[in-house]
Image: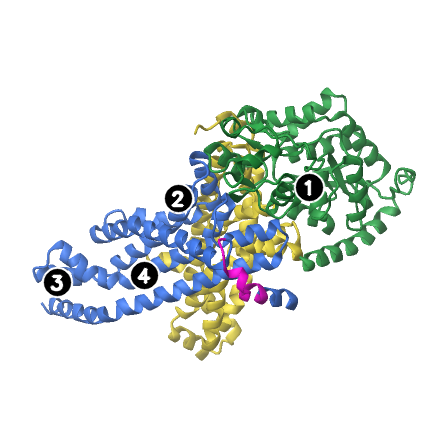
Amino acid sequence: MYELFKNLAKWLVSGDQWAGTDGIAHRIAEHLEYSLLATLIAAAIALPLGLLIGHTGKGAFLAINLSSFGRALPTVGLVVLVFLVSGLSLWSVYVALVVLAVPAIVTNTYAGMSAVDPEVKDAARGQGMRGHQVLFQVEIPLALPLIMTGLRLSLIQVVSTATIAAYVSFGGLGRYVFDGLAQRDLVQVLGGAALVAIVAVVLDLALAGLQRYLFLPHSRLRSSGRDPHRRTAAH
Amino acid sequence: MNRRTLLGGLFAAASVPALAACSSGITSLDSSGGGSGGGSGSSAGGLTIGTANFSENQILGYLYAGVLGAAGIKTKVRPNLGSREIVVPALEGGDIDLLPEYQGSLLLYLDDKATDTEAGAMQNTLTTVLPGGLEVLPYAAAEDRDSFAVTKETAAKYGLTSLADLRKANGKLVLGAAAEMKKRVVGVVGLKDRYGVEFKEFKSLDSSGPLVKGALKKGDIDVANVFTTDVDVIENGWVVLTDPLNLIPSQHIVPLIASRKADAKVRKALATLGNVLTSEELTKLNRLVDKEKKDPDAVANTWLKSKKLA
Amino acid sequence: MTVDWSWIGDHTHDLTSLALSHLQAALLAVFFGLLISLPLAVVAHRVRALRGVFLGLSNVLFTIPSIAIFVLLLPVSGLTRTTTVIGLTVYTLVVLLRNTVEGLDSVPVKTKEAAKAMGTRPLRTLLTVELPLALPVIMAGVRIATVMSISLVSVATYIGDGGLGQLFTDGFQRNFPTPVIVGVVLTLLLALVADALLVAVQYVLTPWTRRRA
């Protein structure tokens, strides 16, 4: 074990391991490209959907079941299926990753929206706010923590699963896992796995930081949102 | 890698005495085949046959099971176990006992500096580089050689018929093959040293699998590493480049077996199969599985019956 | 892309055994995941300092690609079901541990104090008061972990196991969509059925939540 980790450390810090198109730096860049693009596409689909369901209160059944349905979909199967249809292209990777990422974002967005006190929304309307104003100035800010939770969850899963790109010949950190196996180099497999975990953790911490930054100013909004609630309650 | 072999070795060391101990008492009559190449194993407890994750290997696994079954030996087939890097250690570790292998690929897996290309010589070298407890039995008539193929269009464009012709297109073509070919003599290194060929790029795909064939079809690569028994090569009219300098080693099919299981009955049954199974026959079986989507076990059994082997 | 229905008809026996093997791997993983999570969660619930450590660790384990875990386990446990189950168990922890801790947290302090006042010993309180009250939250975790495991089993095809995942490599190697489609659909079905069964189990195990509704 000790020997293995010593070799891992050596592998991770060696300079020529980082350079070139096979190098760690390039592989991380590819891995980030797959993961971030897939999560962005997923967010572009899932956020409006979650907001719509949460705002209108229609389709809640869909939101809840979508998450368990999505969790059950086997990523390997999806990759192979899209590969058989579209051939050797990044489509297979992106479709599978987006499908993986959508459910958690929809469900959490919906959950965040539905947790907003209906009386707060009523009060906002009572103050003359329009539908979209209620959505953007009251509901979304209040739902933001859960929305961010959904995004973080999806991103972690996508980063970890983007390893599969190498299964269908593409790059990213998964290359080290698959090539390491092909070259019977366990250190390389371990190195690839460790790098994926590090990238996932760093991205998650970055999003947590972003969340804190986004969330703090609105915590004031949340308390100011409580005032109209009290007023209506007093009626 | 050292660790893997070390652990594999430990497992093998631990399991061999145990199995030998439990079988020697029951079947002392069975190990009468002392004459056939030092075979002192016993198949009485039955054999687990492993196969790698592609159709031809699975067909071979079921062919082995069929002839061994006809010889009265119990077998269990574990199909689709993964790549060679996964199955050979499993054989060393004792999870499986018998594996359909290919001379050249197996030799390069065990010793990536091996230079033999002729079947007889390779068989000898294999016995010296195999880890303790494993041996190869006589190779079959059938061979599934590595080859390099291009599309008809590419062949016409650059005038390609042999590997030597590739030099005319130096720096222009993309080679697609399994990752390990990048550093192997049978691959980028040998093509450069022996034929003076230099590619524009190397793409890590697979050997004659969906990736490399998909990429050649789509034009993502120009030269693909395919197997000579692959029916897709004929279906697509791809041009297989000849190898005048004998760079590519022989790839006769060879049973890789744990010595403790290799008794006279097993040896005889597999040798009989090896004599009857030719490359043409194997290609036919591949077509049934890959193109007509028949099951490898059914295809194997029907063929064995037609040849009166089972 | 057409589905070859006759292939499905000819392979019902194989499909059934693959599905059962698939389900077995997933359920074993959840079982061992619970076995590990319960004691760890009890500790984490009591010792605040360890809580972050345990949950953080399970989160980090979750980020390791499953394929790498399987490959790294090969020298240890070989091409066996054990390798598959160990790998899958690692991933169940992230959900099971968190939900079990949260479940225990959700038990009202007053209830625990009442048990204490009645002279119930701590272990007995844990088994007869805390864990039953935490059950709804724990079961929510078990449901998620089960569905997640069922979807993950197919990755183990890379190391020769993988239940229905075998259909994916088969279809991939032979350029044959039918097994792949069947594999995806059956995986979804398994997940839905397992989830429904767990809902039923929870319904039976927690009669008090029914009465409240």
Residue lying furthest left in this view? A128
Which residue type does callout 4 highlight? Met
Q: Amino acid at mark 2?
A: Val
Measured in 3D between alpha carbons, the distance from the residue under mark 4 to the one under mark 3, in whole angstroms, is 25 Å
- Chain for colour blue: A
* Quadrant assignment for the C terminus of chain A: bottom left
Q: Colour of chain C?
A: yellow
The colour scheme used to paint the residues is by chain
Q: Are marks 4 and 3 on the same chain?
A: yes
Distance from disc 4 to disc 2, alpha carbons, whole Å, reads 22 Å
Q: Chain of mark 4?
A: A
Q: Nearer the viewer's eye, disc 1 or disc 4?
A: 1
Q: Chain of mark 1?
A: B
Image position of C61 with respect to B30: above or below: below
Secondary structure character of the magenta stretch overall: helix
Q: Between tags 4 and 2, which lies in front?
A: 2
**Residue at image mark 1:** B105
Q: Which chain is green?
A: B
Whether pointer 4 and pointer 2 mark residues with C-beta atoms closer than 8 Å, the reply is no
Question: Was residue A15 drawn as part of the magenta stretch in this picture?
Answer: yes
Vertical comparison of A96 with A210: above or below:
above
Is disc 1 on the same chain as disc 3?
no
Between A160 and C209, the one lying in front of the other is A160
x 26%, y 61%: residue: A143
How far is disc 3 from disc 2 in space, using C-alphas?
A: 42 Å
Q: Locate residue B45, reporting x and y percent.
A: 80, 42
The residue tagged 4 is: A148
